[in-house]
Amino acid sequence: MDNNKPRVVIAGLRGGSGKTTLSLGLIAAWRQRGGEVVPFKKGPDYIDAGWLALSAAQPCYNLDPYMMSGEQILDSFWQHTQKAQGAVIEGNRGLFDGMDAEGSCSTAELAKLLKAPVLLVVDGTMVTRTAAAAVLGCQHLDPEVPIRGVILNRVAGPRHEEMLRTTIERYCQIPVVGAIPKLKEDDFPERHMGLVTALEHPEAREAILARIQVVERYLDLEKVLAIASQAPPLSWEPVYSEKRVSKAFRQPVIGVVRDSAFQFYYPENLEALEKRGARLVAINALRDTVLPELDALYIGGGFPETHAAQLAANSQFRESLRSAIESGLPVYAECGGLMYLGRTLEINGDTYPMVQALPMDFKLERKPQGHGYTRLEVVGANPFYPQGMTLRGHEFHYSRVIHFDLDPHALVFAVSRGAGILDGKDGVCYRNVLATYTHVHAIGSPEWAEGLIRKALVHQREEKSKSERKKRKMDHGTTNTGVGDGVRQ
């Protein structure tokens, strides 16, 4: 089967070149022309992906050559573009930046895998003819990478644009399809982990509309869409399918804490749970007072540090969650979720109480304490993963553990790449909780969803058995009382 969908990769010479805001405008402008556009983000990213999803009015999917195999990437791309008119893939960092000197896991390698034309964003700040040399270097470093056009960004004025455009088109033999002047970046403010999230931006939709106007004015959209349409057929036979829950079981109910404090979720992870039969229930740790009846709970990453006072103030919910954990509720927590389950979180000298389910304390530092890809081996017993398997994921956190009052054997992951929680270990296990700094992707690690579903079903059966025993006990007591009353009569 061939996938003939128009597609384009937006890449840069470096990080911070303007790929994200340009991609937002392009996706939204393409949509306005009547096309359904599926956004993809290369690499482990939640914030940019959230903005891309808002621009496309549908989920943005991640394609990560480190966490996913080539087959899994192709399968995901195939599955998610079947009903679309096109796809925009935003790269990360520089076009050839990867894991090693060979550029493995780079945006360039992803473009080759997807047979997707590349538009190279070139920052024109304080450069003229040298920009052509940089583009020419990219063309010659790997001629198999399909660089099909250039978009100039932060151009100083008409003369500057003319110099850049003339030299690039003369020496590189590819078109310049747009030239964007220096603009205020106030529409997309940043903080310690990147852009402010779309969920928290007070005027997110207005910011998207402003980028549409930029793209419509400064890009040759007809040329861009023509380049996207020149992508060759992508042959692929879908091979990955999810195991569904047997009809013998009640549909497992899995809670997902989703609010402005916890918003880092790959849509593929949530889809993986649903495809395996789960019903997902959204939970707000900032506003809800009681945890509903669940078979399992998933707490993703986010910004508990910027919402610490609100999380601490909601003591009813924290106590409800702690009580459920003590009663055996299966819980999988990543990064921000890990911090939330601890005793306290210290920020700038102030200490905030958290759920207090895990006897450990966290402190927010000024610099990242863990940033990049991770590789973990499951070395200890836990509710979700078989021992001996290897996980690939990523971490990005400014917090660290300052007190850890559990047995060291409670840490069930051995870290061969990354920082982890403590002393080369990650993944703290307590009762039916597994909490880790590492984020995993459900397509690259299908064991994650399978383990969460399996444990949810076990918990479901256990709770049903408890309920039936309690009912039998109550019925037995009622029967005895009735007989006694009859005798007295």
Image (cartoon, rainbow, N blue to C red):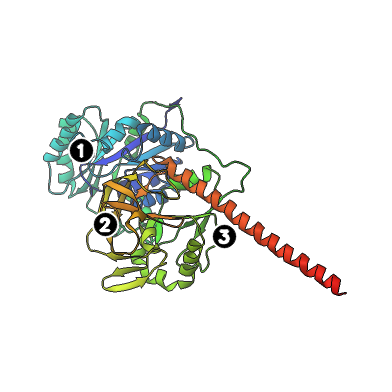
Placement of the C terminus among the 4 image quadrants: bottom right
Circle 2 is placed at which residue position?
Answer: 185
Residue at 27% from the left image edge and 37% from the top image edge: 105
Horizontal and vertical percent for residue 162? Answer: 17, 41
Q: Where is residue 82 in the image (x, y as percent from the top left)?
A: 47, 34
Instruction: Give yes or no for contact between labels 1 and 2 (Cβ–Cβ under 8 Å).
Output: no
The numbered disc on residue 100 is 1
Q: What is the distance, in whole Å, between disc 3 and disc 1 at their CAs?
A: 47 Å
Closer mark to the observer between disc 1 and disc 2: 1
Residue 367 placed where, x, y %? 22, 60
Q: What residue type is labelled 1?
A: Asp
Camera-nearest label, 3 or 2:
3
Q: Which tag, 3 or 1, sits closer to the chain's start?
A: 1
Quick check: 129 left or right of 111?
Answer: left
Nearer to the camera, 454 or 184: 454
Q: List the residue tagged with mark 3.
A: 293
Q: Is residue 256 above or below residue 290?
A: above
Secondary structure under tag 2 reads: loop
168 vs 46, left or right, is left
Above or below, comparing residue 211 to residue 236 in the picture: below
Q: Which amino acid does label 2 sit on?
A: Glu
**Label 3 element class:** loop
Compared across the picture, whether 478 is left or right of 208 comes to right
Q: Which of marks 3 and 2 is nearer the N terminus?
A: 2
Dot 1: element: loop
Tell me the amino acid under the disc marked 3.
Glu
Picture coordinates of residue 360, whole percent (x, y): 34, 64
Q: In which quarter of the image is residue 170?
A: top left
